[in-house]
Image: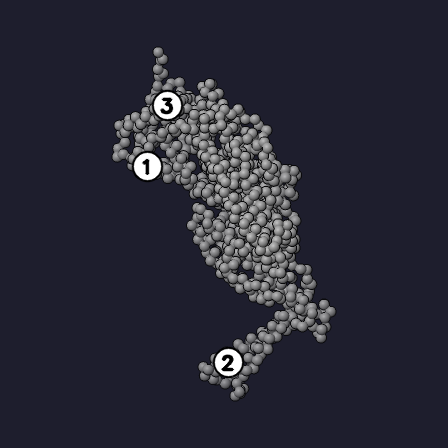
Amino acid sequence: MAVEEATTPYTVEVYDLWGCARSCTIERLDSSNTPAVDFARHGYLTKTALSPSVAISFRTLELYHNIRCCKASFSAEAFGRLLCKYYKIPYRRHMRTIVADTYEVYLNILREVEKRVHSALGWDDPDWRALNACRACCYELEDEPSMRFSRLWVLDGNDSLKRAVTLSDREAADTRVYTDSDYFLPREFVDKYANEVKSRQVKGPQIIPDVESEDEDTPEVEPLHEVEGDPMDGSPDNKGVEQCVRNWKAAALDDKKKAWGIFDETGIFASACRHSQILWVADMVQSGELAKYPLSMVAKGNQTLKRRSLIGYDIGCSFEKTVRNSSLGGDFLAGRHMFCVNAFHGYTHSYDCQVKHHPNVTTGIGLEDLETLERIFSASNNLASITRYASPYRRRQMIHFYFRQWDEEKYLNTGSFILNNYVQALAVLETDRDALATLKEKLQLSDDDLCSLEKEEQEFFATLGKERPWDTYAIAYVELLQRLQQLDSDRSLSTSRFYDSVPSTYSFVTPSTTISSNSYSAEALATARLEQKRRKAMEEYDRVHNEVLNLEIRMNISESERWTPASPQYKETLKYLEERQYQRALMKVQKLVIQRLFELHKLNLAQTGYKLRTHLAKSLQARCKAIRNAVAQYNAAAAKLSPPRPPLDWSQVSHYGFLDEFVLLQDTRNDIRDRPWANTFVREAIKLRRRIARAEEEVVRCNVETRRLHTAIFDEAALFKAVLEELDGQSSPLHGPVKDFVMQRMRINERLLSKISQIYALSGFSGCKGPGVRLGNRPLPRVSSDPSYLLDLSTADPPVSPAIPTSSEDPSPANAEDNDDDDDDNDEVDDDDGDGYDIGRFVQFVATLS
């Protein structure tokens, strides 16, 4: 008969939503090493392991964790208020601290359990997640169809997840650094690339970007100071992307140029695959989007990912040159990696850039828009309200667990993603092929003709929009002559008005003569004003006339040879001036439209603050007025050209699809309306041909990704079976956590198999049905054609969690007994799942963690 071990009872304050008990008596074993194990044996967790005075039940913490997984902005204070509501006690501020501290310990336990589970499965390599988490991207198979790019991923920065710096000289209580994350790149690694792009001198105070600043005043004193280079400064030769660089800088919000220096981390810079699985994250520290952040991502990609990657970035056209000119250029070129711009942002680039770097024209990309991170950031903005004033440790911890939950959801969504893309590609092929055939028949063009017209269009736009070199002296001379002509007219008009004001009954009046008439005083005042205007007009005319004479002397032009509007030199120079005025008016309209589009995009993001929305709304109102004025200036300049250019109206420029037409308006030397490729129907046919090509590529990629996912599910089932059998034979405490992980994973895989079967059932499916063999890594033997039969887990009922009761007027031991009975019922259900939920093994596992 076993001898019962001596215990020492003591009572502590507890919180448990299922029983609403105010205290609990803990029986501590004399052999216990730490109170943490004693509390765990009773189902509670404390925020301190040595002398705990308060504890929260595991199931309460699990509830809070599940709420946080579904609603990231649900704070510890909100959950503390919920506890007080159930306990019918006033909310106390220290409840937030109790919940936050205990939940942090709970998250650390979850993270440690996760690491040990992954270690048991062989998923514990530091780069395993980036290399294997997205099965559709990474699980390469033997005998796959060749694709130009083996992987598509994206880069971008976001300034929502800021963290306020400690004010004044107050020392922060929590100085820890959260390093237990395979998402975040270490700051030391990121800073290695800080000097890859040369620093530049800028005017103004040294400040930190903050999109919520409302300060619109420009400092009077703007000292020069050095700032780190941005992603475009590393490309000394920006030929072909000058307009893209200008547009990208113009798209920045005005209040990014001046802001409060109250943030340490000013946001995050992230990378993700096309299925929205996060690759890596870096903190942007007291800066905006500097070059070192995307460079560090590219460096990590060079080290980790295989060859032939396509990377999407807002300014990928310019940043690719930055990468090639950096120390990463050799590995980048050796890996045959490539940059392109995102679909939405790409429309703000010059058309010359779009025909080279836009997803619509990039061979091998399929129908991917590369705006993945915009959708990710729209969701992760929910974290902003609870990370703004958190400690650095907890901010990173919250971001880590948010993205872990995000990746789990996106893994579940992989099947739907591939299915939807497949359906979209098939719809494009079905509809656009017929439309293209109709257009080709109407235009009497073949595919080869469209290809040659597309090349002709690209060659034309390669040199379009560049100002012709002109004689600067001739420009200045003609501008002075125009000014002199205008002043001569003003002088004649003011002189004539002054002479006409002299009365016919004029008589000289001496100053000593006193005239009391009010009408005479008014007339004298009007006469003085006319004389003043005449004198100013004559002085201005004389000044400009002297400038004309001085310039004519230096240009060897006599006064008798002065250029006139009939002179050939005057006509040629005037034509150039009108073209330049037209080009500048067009660029102004384009810049304002781009700014408006980005403000609309920012305004539509989820969780955008009220102040920022108000600021953006006011900016949009002002921007719309400015665009209307700019359109009027453009139409005036366009009317002066020969032949006149077509006018614009508000309905045209207010739509983003018009951006690619700006470049058509830039040619003032030739009338391109007669060129074949400039025909509206021909351009539509070229676009349809491109879209069909991208859809065909998307079908190939979906075929590959479907089979990869199917193969990974089968291989995982065999792995899970082998690992569980091994752990069960060893009576390892890891058997329960691994089994729990496997059950959840198998249920997700069953859902994915359902989506895969729908893909196989598509009428246009052209891939290989069934799993394949992973390239370079032989999996464990498969024992069934259906992975759900490899483990009798996917069909097992999940553990039943007791429902949360309504709060009682007076929590009593009777209520606790009722809950204990419910727990017994649940234990009966859980017995079917074996020892995965045995409390003894769980306590043993917690003891090893402590």
> How far is mark 3 from mark 1, CA to CA?
34 Å
> How far is mark 3 from mark 2, CA to CA?
110 Å
Q: Residue visible at 40% across and 27% down?
A: 796
| Residue position for label 2 | 524
Query: Residue lying furthest top in this view?
Result: 1
Question: Callout 2 environment at 10 Å: few (<14), some (14 to 19), or many (20+)?
Answer: few
Q: The residue under label 1 is which amino acid type?
A: Cys
Look at the numbered disc 3 and give the secondary structure of its residue. Answer: helix
Q: Is residue 596 left or right of residue 568?
A: left
| Residue position for label 3 | 831
Question: Callout 1 environment at 10 Å: few (<14), some (14 to 19), or many (20+)?
Answer: some
| Residue position for label 1 | 84
Of 224 and 394, nearer the camera is 394
Pinpoint residue 676: horizontal percent, then vertical percent. 62, 57
Q: The residue under label 3 is which amino acid type?
A: Asp
Of 187 and 117, nearer the camera is 117
> Where the C terminus falls, by quadrant?
top left
